[in-house]
Amino acid sequence: MKKARVKAVPARTRGKRGPRPRNSVTLKMVAREAGVSASTASRIINRTVNVSEELRLAVEAAIAKFGFRPNAAARGLALGKTETIGVISQAMASPFYGEGLRGIESRLLRGGYAPLFMSGNWQEKEEVRCMEELITRGVDGIIMFTGCMNDVALKAYARKVPIVVTGRTLRARRLVSMQVDDQYGAMLAMRHLLDLGHRRIAFVTGFENHPDANERLVGYRNALAAAGIPYDPRLVVAGDFHEEGGMQAVYQLMDSNIGFTAMFCVNDETAYGAGLALFRKGMRVPEDISVVGFDDLPASTYRVPPLTSVRQSVQQLGECAAEAMLQLLAGRRPLIVLPPVELVVRESTGRAAG
């Protein structure tokens, strides 16, 4: 009978904080290689001491030789910060938030910070839970990538931790806000449809208390007023920023027998759902109904037909939010200029029939 082969296990030694593999790299090994004390090596790694270029290069060479990775928790204690940033979004599976979070992560990592992502799920009480959890974990700052939390609560939290918030205009100490020009973007979409001869234009909005949805509704109404067209509240239907909300909005409009020749949707995902509902109702886009979205997500180029949309660079918005946080943590008042919105015309819009 064959004896079972026993896999060799590396010998371990016991230190003050429990067993440790003999071949693990320690700060003492790096210090010994560089010819400095462990405390000096630690301060050089954490950049809390000014030393000669020769000593710094010696420590960096030792780190490279052994592949040493400093303990993040110990580094945080030495620096008095965790080098983590909390990020509260709404639905991380959403293409919109996915683009934005990639931008945030990319810029934070280049700045030496790691993001901790949490989702508020479009509920203010959930955003409060996320805020409390992130502050308890000692993050150095929090980015709220759009949200429902009221301004008073945000200002109160900014007294505890630096905050960057997108999707609104708000001023407070240790708080930076940045907002895409939603009103102007909505007016661009509406002017395009009006120029194509459309006069009965439906608008599928978002959550009632959401700043982006409210601003885009204002732009919709302003464009109608500028064209001398009376506002008809029956043409405004609530959505939920998702495909399902866009579908249900179309079904509601069709069932109510309200005539319209074009639709402006609060975001691209809503427009995707609206397009599917129109197809199921036997309506052609753009021959029967023109459709415009907002965000210009990457997938909008590949819809059938390709979607006309108001472009805001969501990834760049995320990068700008992260850059603002880094500047805030460095003690500077951020001066961030967001790229302007623009209309991207594709095949989902055409001239009004007749």
Image (cartoon, rainbow, N blue to C red):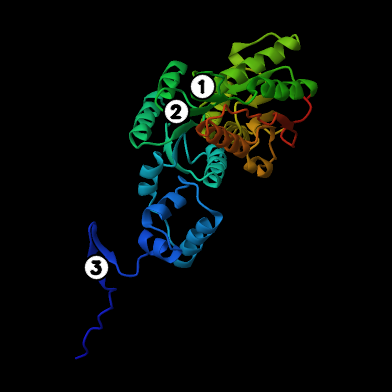
| Residue density around tag 2, few if under 14, some if 14–19, many if 20 or more, within 10 Å | some
Residue located at (22% from left, 58% from top): 16
Residue 187 in the image: state x and y as whole percent.
Answer: 70, 20
Q: Are marks 1 and 2 in contact (CB under 8 Å)?
A: yes
Residue for badge 2: 122
Across and down, in percent, residue 183 comes to 65, 19
Q: Which secondary structure, mark 1? A: loop
Q: Give the labeled residue for mark 3.
A: 13
Question: In the image, what residue occupies the spot 66% across and 17% down?
Answer: 219
Q: Secondary structure at mark 2?
A: loop
The C terminus is located in which quarter? top right
The residue type indicated by label 2 comes to Trp
C-beta proximity under 8 Å, tags 3 and 2:
no
| Whether residue 347 can be seen here | yes
Please give left or right for residue 311 compared with residue 135 in the image: right
Q: Secondary structure at mark 3?
A: strand
Q: Nearer the viewer, residue 50 or 216?
A: 50
Residue, disc 1: 210
Q: What x and y, as percent, mark residue 137? A: 34, 37
**Amino acid on which disc 3 is placed:** Thr
> Does residue 256 appear anywhere in the picture?
no
Mark nearer the viewer, 3 or 1? 3
Q: Is residue 234 left or right of residue 157?
A: right
In the depicted structure, whether residue 215 falls above or below residue 100:
above
**Residue depicted at x 62% and y 32%:** 278
Real-space Cα distance between discs 3 and 2? 51 Å
Occupied quadrant, residue 48: top left
Whole-number angstrom distance, CA of label 3 to CA of label 1: 57 Å
Residue 68's place in the image compared with 154, above or below, is below
What is the distance, in whole Å, between disc 1 and disc 2 at their CAs?
A: 9 Å
